[in-house]
């Protein structure tokens, strides 16, 4: 998966608890993304980063925050998880304008 | 806003038969178009992309796609399907902001019958 590690791979949590998902890359790529994948919706962009401490919102950013303090790490935080945030979360990285490389995903269940 | 439509949720093809997966996009400018494939439990892998130039693009694993501006389409084709092609396929349009922000279609699941 092009030097991308997502952790954890699976997580079950309860409504109202905070959750942080981590994306770690070894490629030194500038751009990093968080997508969620849901049946019938394909992949939807949550947040993205175009450099250290440079982030912006995607189309489904409500309820999520991100941080990027180092080039290699991009964290996605659910401040207070809800059942609607049960999903598969994918991190992606990109060096330029060419293509995205995806991680293997994190399956999150909010009960 | 840009959008992508993949009208077929599931498609079943016999092994050795030809394949065409449909993709229509909506975008005001010249689009960057992509096809990605996702095997079960895995992330997405790029099959091919169109940025400009020749409207018939070749990708990995024997796939090709043709950009037709008049039809706002970017259909994926393969002349002879193998059982290992069973997966979910996503079409995406890229917004040219200097880096790739992709809008994905809802995907087409390909089943390959013996």
Image (cartoon, coloured by chain):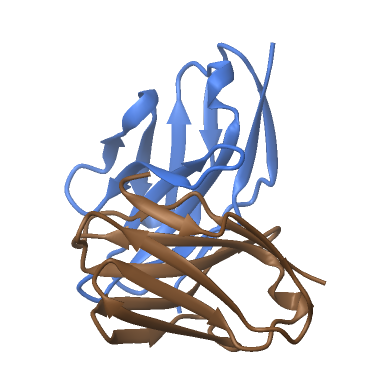
Chain colours: A brown, B blue
**Image side of residue A91 versus residue A61, left or right:** left
**Residue A42 in view in this figure:** no
Q: Nearer the viewer, residue A30 or B37?
A: A30
User: Given the current orientation, which residue lies at the most extreme right position?
Assistant: A111
Give the position of the C terminus of chain B as an image quadrant: top right
Residue B47 is drawn in which quadrant?
Answer: top left
Residue A5 picture location, percent across and down: 41, 54
Q: Is residue A4 above or below residue B75?
A: below
Quadrant housing the N terminus of chain B: bottom left
Residue A37 visible in this rendered orientation of the protein: yes
Residue at 69%, 46% in the rendered image: B9
Residue beneath the point at 53% across and 16% down: B82
Between residue B42 and residue B3, name the one nearer to us. Answer: B42
Does residue B96 appear left or right of residue B19 in this picture?
left
A49 relative to A109, above or below: below
Residue A45, given in percent of the width and then of the height, sits at 48, 72
Residue sitting nearer the eye, A73 or B58: A73
The number of numbered discs placed on residues in the rendered structure image is 0
Residue A35: give x, y in percent of width and height: 50, 67
Say whether residue B55 is left or right of residue A12.
left
Q: Quadrant of residue B41?
A: top right
Residue visible at 28% across and 54% down in the picture = A99
Q: Measured along the vertical axis of the image, is residue A74 above or below residue B19? A: below
Would you say B57 lies left or right of A88 here?
left
Provide residue B34's location: percent of width, then percent of height.
Answer: 37, 51
Write the residue at 31% across / 46% down. Answer: A2
């Amino acid at each position: 998966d092009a030097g991308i590690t997502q952790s954890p791979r699976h997580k079950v949590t309860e409504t109202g608890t905070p959750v942080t998902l981590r994306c770690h890359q070894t490629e030194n790529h500038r751009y990093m993304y968080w997508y969620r994948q849901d049946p019938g919706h394909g992949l939807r962009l949550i947040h993205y980063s175009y450099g250290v401490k440079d982030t912006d919102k995607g189309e489904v950013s409500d309820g999520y925050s991100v941080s990027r303090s180092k080039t290699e790490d991009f964290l996605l935080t659910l401040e207070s998880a809800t059942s609607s945030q049960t999903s598969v979360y994918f991190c992606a990285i990109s060096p330029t304008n060419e293509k995205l490389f995806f991680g293997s995903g994190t399956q999150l269940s909010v009960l | 806003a840009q959008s992508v439509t993949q009208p077929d949720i599931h498609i079943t093809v016999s092994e050795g038969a030809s394949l065409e997966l449909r993709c229509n996009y909506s975008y005001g400018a010249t689009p960057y178009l992509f096809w990605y494939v996702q095997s079960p439990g895995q992330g997405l892998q790029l099959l091919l992309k169109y940025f400009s130039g020749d409207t018939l693009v070749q990708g990995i694993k024997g796939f090709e796609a043709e950009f037709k501006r008049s039809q706002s389409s970017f259909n994926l084709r393969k002349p002879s399907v193998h059982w290992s092609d069973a997966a979910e396929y996503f079409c995406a349009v890229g917004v040219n902001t200097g880096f790739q922000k992709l809008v994905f279609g809802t995907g087409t699941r390909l089943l390959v019958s013996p």
